[in-house]
Amino acid sequence: MPQPQKYGSRLAGKVAVVTGAGAEGSQVGIGRAIALVLAGEGARVCCSDIDLARAEETALRINREGGDAFAFGGDVSDGKACARLVSETVARFGRLDVLVNNVGISTPTTLESIDDAAWSRIFDINLKSAMLMSKYSIPEMTKTGGGSIMNISSIAGIGALGSLAYGTSKAAMAQLAREIAVMHGRDGIRANTVAPGHLMTPHAMHVLPADMRETRRKIGPLGLEGDAWDVALAVCFLASDEARFITGVELPVDGGVTAIGPMAAHALIMRAD
Ligand SMILES: NC(=O)c1ccc[n+]([C@@H]2O[C@H](COP(=O)([O-])OP(=O)(O)OC[C@H]3O[C@@H](n4cnc5c(N)ncnc54)[C@H](O)[C@@H]3O)[C@@H](O)[C@H]2O)c1
C-alpha cells in the first residue's frame, strides 16, 4: 500500500510520542509510518529513536508535509531517557495524549542459545521500554483528561513462531497493556496492543528468504502480505476518539493468519494460487 494520501483531522489538537520512529534513509518502517499517519491526521508528534539522524529524517518528512514534529534521540530502555523524552515533549507541545511503544528487536533465540545478557537485552528493549514510557507518560496524560497508549507487539507473541525471548517479550507487552487499561481506566487512559505479522517492511525484507515469503503469503486467509501503513492505520484508529470505548484489546494486523487452524493453513498451501 502506498502512503495514504487522504487525511482528515481525527487527531487534531493531540500530541503523540512514537518510539522507534526512525528508519534507514528514506525507507518506511512501522514507527516512521505511524508517525507520518498520526501527523497526517493532525497530531503534533515527537519522533524518538536511539539513532537521532533516523528520527530527524521522520520529523523532517512530517514538517515538509505541513505537520509539526521534532526528533528526540535516546535509548528507551533507560528510564532517565524516557523521563526526558516525555518532559521535552510536554515542554514543546504543552500536553501528551498518545503514546506508541513501537521499539522492538527480534534476535532469534532458543533455550540452547540464550544467555542472561541476551534475554535481558531483548526484554529491556521490547518490554521494559514500554513500561517506562507508560510510567512517565500517564501522569502527563491524566492532567488533560486521559490518553491512548498502544504497544506494538507481534503475532510471535500470540502463537509460538520459534523465537524464545522475542515471542515471550511480545506476549508480555499485551499483558502490560491490559494491566494499564485496568489500573488507569478511571484516569481516562486506554491501553491496547497492535500485533503485526506477515508484513513486508525494510526489516522483513532483510531477514526473510524469498521462498519463505511465498509460503507466508499462501498461509494467510487473504493471500496477501501487509505493510507498515496497514499497522499505522490501525494505530491511528486506536489513538483517536473513535476508539473511546476500546481498551485492553490486542488487535492482530496480519491478514487473518492468527485466525487460521493448522489443517486450513495446509489446505491453503496446497492450492495453486
Ligand atoms: N517488521 C515486521 O514485519 C514486524 C512484524 C511484527 C512485529 N513487528 C514489531 O514492530 C515494531 C517495529 O518494527 P520494524 O521492523 O519497523 O522495526 P525497525 O527495526 O525497522 O525499526 C525500529 C527502530 O527502533 C529503533 N530502536 C531500536 N532500539 C531502540 C532503543 N533501545 N531505543 C530507541 N529506539 C530504538 C531503531 O534504531 C529503529 O530505527 C517492533 O516492535 C517489531 O518487533 C515488526
Image (spheres, rainbow, N blue to C red):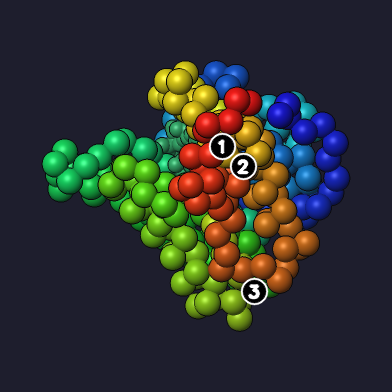
Mark 1 element type = helix
- At 73% across and 57% down in the image, what residue appears? 240
Q: CA distance from mark 3 to mark 1?
A: 43 Å
Residues at discs 2 and 3 in contact (Cβ within 8 Å): no
Q: Amino acid at mark 1?
A: Leu
* Rendered location of residue 191, percent (x, y): 57, 64
- In the visual, does 67 lie left or right of 215? right
Numbered badge on residue 188: 3
**Label 1 vs 2, first from the N-terminus:** 2
- Foreground tag (2 vs 3): 2
User: Do the residues bearing badges 3 and 1 touch, measured as CB atoms within 8 Å?
Assistant: no
The kind of secondary structure element at disc 2 is loop
Disc 2 residue type (three-letter): Pro
Q: Which residue is the extreme one toward the bottom?
A: 186
Question: What residue sits 14% from the left and 41% below the top?
Answer: 112
Residue 197 seen in this snapshot: no
- Alpha carbon of mark 1 to alpha carbon of mark 2: how far? 8 Å
The residue pinned by badge 1 equals 268
Dot label at residue 221: 2
| Lateral position of residue 94 relative to residue 128, left or right | right
